[in-house]
Image (cartoon, rainbow, N blue to C red):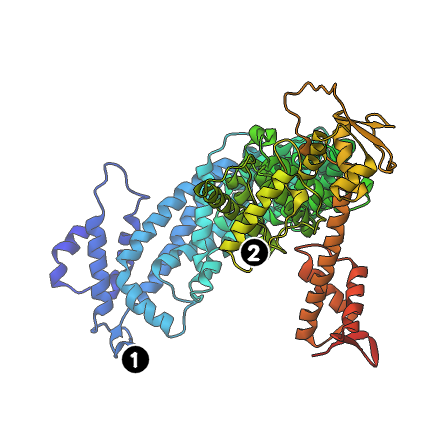
Amino acid sequence: MVANRTANRTAQVATFAETPVWVVSAVDCKPFVLTKTSCRPTAIWTCTRNDVFNYCSNSLQNEPTQVNVANNGAEFVGAQLYKHLVEYIENFNAALLRKFEDKSGEDLLDVYTSIWHKYQFSFTVVNGVFAYLNRHWVKREMDNGNPNQVFEVYNLAMITWKNVIFGKLNNNVSSAILKLVEQERNGEKIRTKLISGVINSYLELGVSEGVASTAVQRPISRLAVYKEFFEIRFIENTKNYYTQESVEFLQKHSPVEYMKKVEQRISEERDRCELYLDRSTQDPLAETLNDVLISQHMEYMQNEFQTLLINQKNEDLGRMFLLCGRVAGALDKLRDLLERHIGREGAEAIEKIAAMAAANPKSFVTAILQVHDRYHKLVAEFFQQDPGFVQALDKACTSFINANAVTEAAKSSSKTPELLTRYSDLLLRKGSKLAEEGGTEECLNQVMVIFKYLDDKDVYQKYYSKMLAKRLVGELSASDGAESSMISKLKQMCGFEYTSKLQRMFTDAELSKEVTEEYKKHIQSHGTRYNIDCSIKILATGVWPFSPTESFVIPPAMRESMDTFTAFYQAKHTGRKLNWMLPMGKGELASTPQMAVLMLFNDSTEYSLEKMTGLLNMPQEQVIAHLQVVIKLELIKATPGGFELPSNAAGDTLLKLNDSFNNKRMKVDLSKVPMRGDVKKENDEVQKSVDDDRSMVIQAALVRIMKTRKTLKHTQLMTEVIQQLSSRFQPKVPMIKKCIDTLIDKEYLKRVENDRDSYEYLA
């Protein structure tokens, strides 16, 4: 029949009576009947496509036609052709359904996927054969309001499969798929192509749900069949399977082994979804796994967190973090546990070295860094720098660094910044073994790690300023580069104002070197020779942390050098006044006051304390303090007392040069021997200076806030002041109240008449 139709094609016009034959020839020339020896059906499909075109476009047919206004009145014929096409596809599917009789399980899937692939491909081709019908008659009918009765040929085939075959088989097919999935979960090898083939049919059948949908609804409708007939059951089976497995596994294994199992199962399910399920299943599947495997056993896992922290099982901790992170709110408890654990461990670490901390700042800093570094690595590498865990680490470190056994023993929170400053001083001094061990820059970075957590950063600034001054004046710095680097780090963290005086001190020291060189050239140019090779530091008033000092009688040789330099400097800088800070100076082996004491023994080997005090024109308590250093080294002997001189020594105490002085060291530097009471005096001075500065800073903050707000409640004012100043120090409530009273006395503020709990700014 095909050959005859082809030969006479130009001489005949298709008639309605031939329509069923076209349908049969088009549909039957499909992969179902093809073999390797079959001839290609291209000729038949081409002829049929042409016949469909001729039939649908023939305006001389006797069957009634309709006019489509949207297509400029053109007439299309196709209703009867479409009707016969529907009938044939329905009968064809009914015949296919018989092939599934007595099939179940994997055999059912085998037959289903095989027939489905051929069916899908066949009607893809048939859809092209009837392309003219789709473009014109079918489109016209759909545009005229029949989208649920008329479909393109491919969609018609899918809908018919769904109604005839899928409607009868979907329950058994889905059950067979779920059985294969369970077998794979149990470790058996399965033919995953069977599952992916069926899933493909579920997705394609969704077209019947979406052909009448809008463009926005269509992607959702395409998944309707898949979700209704497979995904819902798949999720339920998954829930039941892992509920049972998790309970049984936990009865025989540890929490760590369980977490590894959960991690493995989640990975397997993710791969399974990517391999043969639709990606839309990922989210509901993940939610189910999170609920069954994690949420329902959350407490069991979280109870293991503390043990893992103690034993430093970072990989297991990271595993727990990832698993708990899949459940909303589950990490909150872990963050709290981590914060408390770090706080306890840090406090215990400091308590172990508390007795030696004051004398050995390195032990204090090392104890802190060991705890911080351990948990910083945990948070960074295994907790993925999670902001919540970073905050927990910061809060814990802030807690134990600022309040610990050392601060309790000293009864002052300022002890931490003091010890950190002393450690910084050790790093930056000449001959520092600490810097040699770890590298100066690395050690300074470690200092900044701890500095970040200090509540009282202003206390650190005070101590650092004093120690920097001593290093610069005494030329004790290991390197200018290290000093500059440290100031830069402090500036980066706290701002310009915090380091402005430190930078000015450093600048003064650099300029002093230039002045000293100019002075030496001046001396040489005038042919003057002095036995003293001096280095002079010009310090700006108000920048350096030195209190005014009393003068005393110094040796004539030193006085001559001082007078010469004063004349040189004032000639160069008219109007500037030099105030000599004699106690701050030092010689090769002794401080200036110590030199003044020792050089008296060039004239006599024995003095009474009263006479020495008179010759030096120095307060007796200061003379005693300087003598205690040299007496302790047995260079001078006191009578009474021997090599001990009490602070309340009488004026008639004899001080005699020890002719038999001997020391194992080749060089004894008296200036490096700490004077009794120096540390306590320095601490008292720092604390007083800090309190004074804080008072002024708080008052300034109060004025700024009130100037902006005009009127404010007491509680709100306190809160805003604390917030503004917390980056520099933690202002105490009593001090803030005292500053408020001071500003009221100064008439910057006043209490509101009818509301004593509120303040008003006075311009």
Q: Circle 1 is placed at which residue position?
A: 69
Q: Residue at x 54, y 51 (%)?
A: 567
Residue at the location (74% across, 68% down)? 717
Is residue 406 something one can see in this rendering? no
Eyeballing the image, is 649 above or below 500?
Answer: above
Residue 385: name its quadrant. Answer: top right
Q: Position of residue 403 (x, y in %)?
A: 77, 44
From the viewer's perspective, is 330 left or right of 141?
A: right
In the rendered image, the vertical position of residue 549 relative to residue 477, given as above or below: below
Within the image, what quadrant is residue 372 found in?
Answer: top right
Q: Earlier in the sequence, mark 1 or mark 2?
A: 1
Residue 42 is labelled as none
| Mark 1 or 2, closer to the camera | 2
Kind of residue sitting beneath label 1: Val
Q: Nearer the viewer, residue 180 or 286?
A: 286
Seen from the viewer's position, the closer of residues 13 and 273 is 273
Q: Residues within 10 Å of mark 1 (few under 14, many from 20)?
A: few
Where does residue 378 sit, x and y in percent of width and height? Answer: 62, 37
Q: Residue at x 41, y 48 (%)?
A: 95
Nearer the observer, 20 or 456: 456
Answer whether residue 417 is visible to the viewer in this image: yes
Q: CA distance from mark 1 to mark 2?
A: 80 Å
Q: Which residue is mark 2?
A: 496
The total of numbered circles placed on residues is 2
Spot occupied by residue 217 in the image (x, y as percentages of width and height): 47, 64
Q: Residue furthest bottom?
A: 754
> How busy is the neighbourhood of tag 2: few (under 14 within 10 Å), some, or many (20 plus)?
some
Q: Amino acid at mark 2?
A: Phe
Quarter holding the C terminus?
bottom right
Label 1 SS: helix
